[in-house]
Every structure is written in structure tokens, then in C-alpha cells.
Image (cartoon, rainbow, N blue to C red):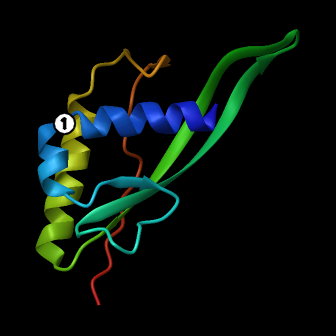
Amino acid sequence: MSLAFAKSLRALLLADANVNVAVPGGIHPDYIPQEATFPAAAYTVTSTPASSISGTFGICTAEMVLHLRAITPAQIAAAGAAVLQSVINSPNRTEAHGTIIAGLRVTGATYDAE
């Protein structure tokens, strides 16, 4: 389920024009390719199937961790804001790549500039 969810959420983010402008290097599974332009993002996904006494329902709770990389703090701020706004603006129930996404939320963000 993680792979389907990841493809669906990636498609939803890339369908947002503001995300495409703020993250021109793309959103990639697992790692950012060496040849990518910055800002760029990589994601990892975990999922937990919901189950009952009689078995698994076929729905799950999934979590995507998105790692943004950029050259300047301003680029990171713009990319993060675009992704956050895309999540906020997403409909409560949408379908992408055959997966129904019931809702999206951001549970935390960290920023470290050295």
C-alpha cells in the first residue's frame, strides 16, 4: 500500500503549479538524484493497515516524510510553504492513481540552517 499511496500523493503535489515552481528539481522516492537541480525533494513512506477482529479492511494510515533540499534558506522557506499550502488546499477526499486519499495533514516541520 505504501507504494500506491506515495505515487498518489506525489501526483497530487506535482499537480499543484506552486509546488512545481518552488521545487523545480522534482519530488523523488528515497533520495534526490545527483543531477537534480535545487530545490528538490525526496520522500519516504510508511503505512499501517487498519484491521478488525475479522481481518484487514483494505484501508490504511500512511505517513510520508518529505525532505526538501535547497541552496538558500529562502528557497527552503518557499518550497516548504508551497508544499504546506498544497496540503491545506487539498480536498478532504480525492482520488489519484486509483488510491482514495481521505485527507492530508502536516504534523510537523523542522528547519536547520547551518
Q: Residue furthest top?
A: 54
| Kind of residue at badge 1 | Asp
Q: From the top left corner, tell me how far across and down residue 56 is, in percent.
A: 79, 17
Q: Is residue 61 above or below residue 10?
A: above
Q: Closest to the observer: 35 or 9?
A: 35
Q: Where is residue 37 drawn, in percent x and y?
A: 24, 69
Which residue is disc 1 drawn over? 16
Q: Quadrant of residue 23?
A: bottom left
Tell me if residue 63 comes above or below residue 52 in the rendering: below
Q: Give the percent coordinates (x, y) of residue 61.
A: 59, 31
Which residue in the rendered view is the most extreme toward the front?
Answer: 35
**Which quadrant is the C terminus positioned in?**
bottom left
Q: In this view, which residue lies farthest toward the right?
A: 54
Crowdedness near tag 1: few (<14), some (14–19) or many (≥20) residues, C-alpha within 10 Å: some
The residue at 22%/38% (across/down) is 86
* Residue under the point 38% across and 40% down: 10
Quadrant of the rendering where the N terminus is positioned: top right
Give the answer, above or below, for where 11 lies relative to 23.
Answer: above
Residue that appears at 27% across and 83% down: 113
Residue 93 is situated, as x and y percent measured from the top left of the image, at: 37, 15
Above or below, 94 relative to 82: above
For mark 1, give the secondary structure: loop
Total numbered labels placed on residues in the image: 1
Quarter holding residue 111: bottom left
Tell me if 8 is positioned left or right of 24 in this view.
Answer: right
Q: Residue at x 19, y 36 (%)?
A: 16
Q: Is residue 107 left or right of residue 52?
A: left
